[in-house]
Amino acid sequence: MNKNKEIAAAVDDPHDLTQGAIVKKLLLFALPIIAGNIVQQLYNVVDTIVVGRFVGPHAIAAVSVAFPAMMVFNCLFMGLGMGSNIIIAQKRGAGDMDELTKAITSNMALTIYGGLIITVLGLVLGRGLLELLNTPADIIDDATTYLNIIMIGTIGNMMYNSCNGLVRGMGDSKWSFYALLISSVINVVLDIVFVAVFHWDVAGVAIATTLAHIISAAILFYRVAAGKYPGRINLKRLHVVDKDIFVAVLRLGIPSSLQSAASSVGNMLIQSYSNSFGTLFISANSIAIKVDGFAIMPLMGLGMAVTTFVGQNIGANKDERAAKGVRSATVMVITFGLTLGVILSNFGIGIMRLFTDDMQVLTMAQRGLRVLAITYCFMGMQNVWGGSMRGCGSATAPAVVALTTTFARIPVAYFLAVKPLREMADAAVAAGEYATRELAIAGGVGVNENMLGMFISMAFSVILGAVLIGLYYFFGNWKAKAIRFSAPNGAPAGGPGPKGAPRGPMAPPAAAAVESGEETAETPAPAPVGAAEESTEAPVEE
């Protein structure tokens, strides 16, 4: 009787993703993540709407140009957060609470040290990076102001992202949403007050966003430190980074950090290409990307949910359940992707009118958005399959794919957009119509004819990424490289199982006992090494 009560409690626990109906658990966990991502996207969107309405298109361009430079600093430690999330999810699934608390505390110490380093680097090098991006002279001062203020508040942003990863790794996606919702409302109010009332322009937007980050971080930090979860922050040891945890975080996080850093460098090159099209295109590109950002939130949210879902189930040695979750999520992102693509292709311009009434900017943005809408299914599959690999502790392959697609995009953008733009502008100069290439482009020469190449290059990189990650997911040997922290088959915690042991959601699974459509609470003995791969094709739980 007591055993049945324990099983029922485990199934009903919303933070335990190792029990209960898979589709229901995935959706309930993913929905707050999606909502939180949408709210987080509102930070930048509200910034853009406010500066566009109360300052002008040049301010939109300044905020847009500052973003890639900001990311190149933040990404240095973003991958370490991913490594911590994987460890925490697996330890939560394994029920190792002492190690869970140690991992959480070490992660927060790393965040504090990392935030201080990034703040200094951003303030010292920020202006130089903007100059390397060929930022137009009429917006570089505003872009520098925005970037410097955001850099000063970097610790708040990093603390939020770190606490958010901790909370999700322990199976709670709701409180990250609540924290973002509260801070988003504050962000909207402060944006309007600082820009429309105080006339602080771009600086006001940056201050409002920074304060919002600090508030959301404080809410989640309190919940973890106050012991609202099985693991907590040990405040007395917050200055200490556990050596074993640090090594494991580096092993899992360095691939993602390198991916983020290299991707940011690639994105800066792309931004420099965009800047060469002039201020109007920069504004149009910024608006299209922000609307596109909302569209991909469900796809990214499901990918994040899969990482935690797979991590907990791998930690609990429930490989087959992890595999079923990945298949279910794949079906969902394909459905969402098709639906969102159709909606934005036909009605996107109505949404973009929130940002500006300039029809030249809106027309450019709508043309670009229609190209991006084609890619949503591919984006979803890439997020789910990559998230599955990360949840298993195999973070290298998704990082390599992301790097490949980022740098593959650069020559496509150059030959489809930048090169023909420059050739048309140079021809206008040779004909005596303009004194310089820059003046010709500012006059609109070649912009409308070639701007679509920038969006085509983005679509190309997304589709290529889905193809590459799919090939490696289904046919690669990433399963043998996965890392467990639940000591499967007698292996020590923190490393992979015995040589040849099955690992990962695509590995030969345990013969899960299923009775009346529900799993038992007991973990079955693992299948023999070399068990038939077809056994992973059991019907998806719903």
Image: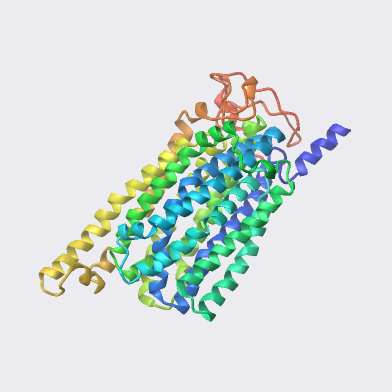
Q: Does the image show residue 342?
A: no
Examine the rendered structure and indicate whether residue 353 appears above or below residue 99: below
Residue 143 relative to residue 490: left or right: left
Residue 467 spot, x, y in % from top left: 41, 42
> What quarter of the picture does the C terminus occupy?
top right
Is residue 235 visible from the viewing direction of this image? Answer: yes
* Residue beneath the point at 69% across and 37% down: 18
Q: How is the image coloured?
A: rainbow
Total marks shown come to 0
Q: Nearer the viewer, residue 466 or 109?
A: 109
Hey, which quadrant is residue 316 in on the image?
top right
Question: Horizontal placement of 455 versus 13: left or right?
Answer: left
* Whole-percent x, y for residue 232 in the image: 70, 43
Of 45 and 202, the residue lying toward us: 202
* Residue for point 32% across, 54% down: 269
Residue 541 x/y as whole percent: 66, 40
Horizontally, residue 107 falls left or right of residue 223, namely: left
**Residue 394, above or below 302:** above
With 188 as the anchor, is 402 left or right in this view?
left
Q: Position of residue 361 (x, y in %)?
A: 37, 72
Residue at the right extreme? 1
Quarter of the picture containing the N terminus is top right
Vertical placement of residue 399 versus 67, above or below? above
Query: Looking at this rendering, what residue extends furthest in the bottom direction?
Result: 197
Q: Is residue 2 above or below residue 350?
A: above
